[in-house]
Amino acid sequence: MELSVFKVNQLGDNVLFLPVVETLQRVLPDAVIHLHTGRIASPLYEGLLQNGTLTDYDTARFLNSWKRPWELGHYVLRGRRRVGKTSLLAFDQGTTAFVMAAMNGARSRFTWDRTRCKGRWLADRTVSVRNPKAPVEIDWEIARGMLTALDAGDLWPEKPPVPRLEHLRCLNGVEREASRVVIHAGASLPYKSWPIDRYVDLANRYAESAEVYWVDQRKGEETFLSDHVTVVHKPCLREFIALVKSAGLFVGNNSGPMHIASAVGTPGVVLTGPSQPWWDPYYHAERFRVLRRRDLPCQPCDGRWDQAGVCASVRKFECLKAWSVDQVLSECLQWSSQWNPKKLSREPSSTTSPGKTRAASATAELPR
């Protein structure tokens, strides 16, 4: 059996998608799986596929290449011999992926029946998903539909499991340090970030009582970081995953690094401004404290499928700026104290359904 899987997108999207590939490999151990993904997310899958290939692309160029026929043709040719007779196209894939699958001989092309792209007509098998609670649940059901057509649907678990990450050797021997705090102040777009000068102030004050690691963002404000803060320069993805796994607390915005913390089970405090609850931490959700302003009429300004891109409020970035350093530090200290090493050592089974714990995640709001 030869399958191709398309998930060319950002880091966080692929962290959520990882259990789909892990489970396909586990339930179909003899299948040849060709995985197509974004370059930044590619290290997540290295060592996972026992057979088949891993092909990565510049995500932005790949998703927009359908507008440039010569570039689209390049991707189609590159995909030769890397597309199976059956293809799974994740719900967020664009026209390029559909064209690649169709023109390279995929006879059955599975996707979501509400996929929003011009090339969706090239999918001959669509799957309906009722009331998904998070993006990964859509892709999970697409995979179920594909396996059902292959007479293997009974092998597919009911819910997406927590990522096993057994193929990531960087996590071997990594132990959690309760006093270690990892701060990642970045996000894909500026309007999703708590002000970096406040992150710097938070790191400096937190470093008085904890071992603080700061992931370099190449911003001028970082020159004001205390000597007690350890700055991690340009870590590769696997080094970053291991660092987050070793921490007792992760602090950051609603971003790809947040989803990594969610996958490895590191407790976190997340400042989420425009993002929908749809994009909150999915795995180990009960370990996250989400700081959100529900009282603002503009919140959340992002949709499930579309990003606003900019803050349109008269009071710019109020959803994030309303959180002072004192308040965030207090939330971090309180949340960290709830997750002592003894409690963290009791890791849930990799087959635990995150859907049951998702509602237990904590959301903090400012007093009105």
Image: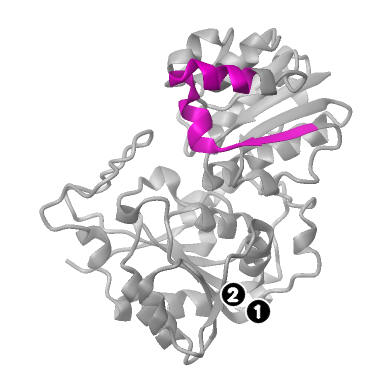
* Tag of residue 315: none
Judge the density around disc 1: few (<14), some (14-19), many (≥20) Cα neighbours within 10 Å: some
Mark 2 lies on a secondary structure that is: strand
Chain part drawn in magenta: 53-76
Q: Earlier in the sequence, mark 1 or mark 2?
A: 1
* Residue depicted at 32% across the width and 74% down the height: 197
Q: Name the residue carrying label 1.
A: 177
Q: Name the residue carrying label 2.
A: 248
Q: Amino acid at mark 2?
A: Gly
* Residue 52 to residue 300: above or below: above
Mark yes or no: residue 128 visible.
Answer: no
Quadrant the N terminus occupies: top right
Residue 141 picture location, percent across and down: 60, 26
Residue 95 picture location, percent across and down: 50, 19
* Residue depicted at 62% across the width and 10% down the height: 102
* Residue depicted at 28% across the width and 41% down the height: 308
Q: Nearer the viewer, residue 319 or 81?
A: 81
Q: CA distance from mark 1 to mark 2?
A: 5 Å
Name of the residue lying farthest toward the front:
70
Number of disc labels: 2
Q: Are marks 1 and 2 in contact (CB under 8 Å)?
A: yes
Decide if residue 165 is on the left or right side of residue 319: right
Quadrant the C terminus occupies: bottom left
Residue 254 picture location, percent across and down: 42, 55
Name of the residue lying farthest toward the right:
30
Q: Quadrant of residue 5?
A: top right
* Residue depicted at 39% across the width and 69% down the height: 219
Mark yes or no: residue 201 visible.
Answer: yes
Q: Is residue 70 magenta?
A: yes
Does the magenta stretch mainly form a helix, a strand or a loop? Answer: helix
Decide if residue 40 is on the left or right side of residue 200: right
Q: Amino acid at mark 1?
A: Glu
